Every structure is written in C-alpha cells, then in structure tokens.
Amino acid sequence: MRILYSCLIRFYGLAALIAAIFNQKARKWVKGRISLFHKLRLGINGDDIIWIHCSSVGEFEQGLPIAKSLKRQHPRYKILLTFFSPSGFEAVIDSESIDFIFYIPLDTRRNAKKFIEIVRPKLAIFVKNDFWFNHLSELNDKNIPTIYISVFLSRNHFLFKGYAIWFRKILSQITHLYVQNVGSKKLLSKIDIPQVSVVGDTRIDRVQEKLDIAKEYPAISKWINGRKIVVAGSVYGQDTKLLSQLIKKNKDVLFIIAPHFVNDKNINRIRKHLGTGALRYSRSKSRINDQEQVVLLDTLGDLYSLYRYATFVYIGGGFNSDQIHNIQEPASFGKPIIIGPNYDKFNEAIELVKLGGAFTIKDTESLEIAFTRLNHDKKLYIESSSICKEYINKNIGATKAIMTSIDYLL
C-alpha cells in the first residue's frame, strides 16, 4: 500500500506541474516548493522547532490559538508553520505568532525523510484531517511526539475503508488525537486507535478571541439605518444564483455579498449576474448611497466584523464538493444562518442544524421559505439567534485542554 500511495502522490505532483501551465493557483503551488529544502536550511539554522501543519486558511484558524499559546508558554521554541494550499500560505504570511512559514513538500518517502532531518521538530502538530502518511511514518520512526487537533471524522472517511490498513497502522503510532466530538472518538476506537480525547474545536476559541476585537464600520451602519440586511459570506456561482432571486423578491432588504474568490474577474461576473448595479465596497468605504441595495465586499479581512451588522447570514459553499465555509464566525455574533445541503464534514454545522440555529436549503424555493420564516417569525428568529450564541459559549476551551498535554510533552 505504501508503494501505491507514494506513486499516487508522485502522480499528483506531475498533474500539478501540468496544471501550472494553465492555472495560477497550481503555478503558485509548484513555485512555492522550488528550492524548498535549501530555504528551510537557511531559515531554521539550528533552532528548536515546533512544527504546525495546516492544509489551508480554515485549518490555520484552528491552529492559531495553539500557536499563540505556545508563544506565551514556551517562548524558547520557534514555530514553523507549513501549508499545503497557496491560499493558506498567502493569507497568514505576516502572523506575529509564527516564526517560519513554508509549504509542506510533496508527501513522498524521500521528501518526508529530508524534511524531518532538516527541521528536527521537538513536536509536530497537524490540524484537522490533513493526513500525510510518509511524513507521519518518518515522525514515528524518529520518535518525535506528534498530535492531531480539531479532528472531525465521519464513517465515510477513507480511514474506515477495508484498503486503509497501512494508513490506520501509521495513525495508531502517533502520540495523540484531539477530536471535536464523541462520534469521531468512537469511530477511531473501532479501528484500534485509542489515544483519543474529545476536547472540541480550537477554532471556536479563535472565533471568540476575534469577537473581542471586531471592527466597526460607520458607513455600513449609516447605510443600514435600521433596515434588515443579509450578509452572505464566501459565495460561489450557485450561491449567487440563489441570492439573486432573493434580492429581486425582497427589495426592502439590504445585502452584503462576499465572494469566495476576491478578484476583479469574479467580482464583475457577480455584478453582471445580479443585475442590480451592485456597489463595490472598496470604492465607497466612506459613504454608501441609501438607495443601494447590494454591496459587494471586494476586500480581505472585513467579512468577520461585518457579520455584526447582519440580520441573517447566508454561508456559501454548501453546493460544492468541498462543502460550506465557516459558520462559527456569524454564530459568535448570534446570527441565524442559512447554508446549502453539503455540510456533513463540519461538526458545528451538524450540531447547529440539529439545535435550530442553522437552516439548510437545496434550491431557490427552500431559500425563500427559510428566509421568510426567519424574517416574519420573531420567536423563531430570537430562538435561533440564542442557540447560535449559546453554542459558541458552551464550546470554548479546546485550546486550554490541548495545551495541558502539550506542556507535559515539552
């Protein structure tokens, strides 16, 4: 199985090289790994390293509370952060809690051996479900403490398939896994991985931290002026189609729409599709005309704080295979949330749907029904708002629990 896995990894690398000819993201993925080991040697230069690996931006938000705690409690260690995705690498390049940021090398046996020899981490921390088995195998061979945080698994995960014996064996040898829910622990126990603790999601700690420093936007507040507003975060094409119908049918409701891909081409495509003359936020920050119904958020770093102004929140991605984006952020403000049908990889979404803080839709009609219910049923609105806020408050503390164990390991 290891040979087959390594062959598939190499094939992925070859496919990325070919894709880089046509695709900018693939180009960044390839370029970021050029001379990687040479850059690592020059950068690290004998420091005592704690290695944190994240797939992309969302996982970084889960890993950041741990990185900050490590900086406070164990300042003699340098924090090395690696990413698989260019979007993650670019989003956090200036974080003051991180000493070094690199891409993780392609997960071949040779690359893993070379990476671990250079870095020599005192502790390796992997975030959520990013399993790189040659790197994990090398860490096991070198007896380097290795933990996973914020893990969330469903029974459909490949680890629970018949062919995954080799993967399960490697995972059974790592130090510990900190999972989000009891279901994940039960699934891991069935495949003889007992070193598991249920502590919740560190991203909730991060969201609560951000709540205390959320910005205010006087121009937005003045534009809203007591009117109801939908804030739609990380929307894709299908999300835009559904929202365009909602906009047309609810002329008395305002909308802030934040695309997942923030670039001129995508912004212009959305404006054309909406057909409402949607205003670009970057060109009207100081003042927004009262007659505008739709503002397109074409800046980075503002979406979280803008959730505070929402009456309702729509979170995009639920019609994609990768599934929904972060719903913890609007939940921290106590905002009812509407999402698409694909959300089963996210524990907080599953829980909030069950509790009644989030509402799922599958098409234009179901979106209109969910919106109308929240818009006109005051009792439902208040209850769902309270559920969201209470969920966040009840689930704070994963970072503290994990750090207790990390303190012991170090």
Image: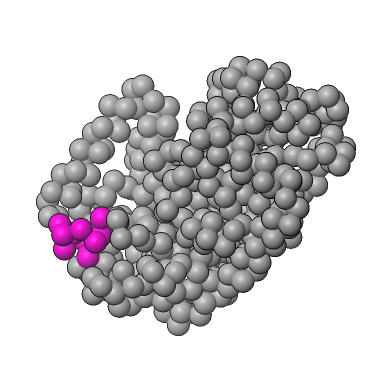
Q: Does the magenta stretch include residue 160?
A: yes
Residue 258: tell me if it is visible: no
Q: Does the magenta stretch include residue 161?
A: yes
Residue 345 at x, y percent in the picture: 42, 54
Residue 162: tell me if it is visible: yes
**Prevailing secondary structure class for the magenta stretch in the rendered image:** helix
Residue 36 falls in image quadrant: top left
At x 52% / y 77%, what residue is drawn? 401
Q: Is residue 296 above or below residue 354?
A: above
At x 61% / y 40%, what residue is drawn? 369
Residue 86 falls in image quadrant: top left
Q: Which of 68 and 120 is in front in this view?
A: 68
Q: What stretch is highlighted in magenta?
A: 158-168
Quadrant, the C terminus = bottom left
Q: Nearer the viewer, residue 207 or 384?
A: 384
Residue 248 at x, y percent in the picture: 68, 25
| Image position of 61 (left or right of 22) | right
At x 61% / y 17%, what residue is drawn? 272
At x 63% / y 53%, what residue is drawn? 329
| Image position of 148 (left or right of 78) | left
Residue 127 at x, y percent in the picture: 43, 60
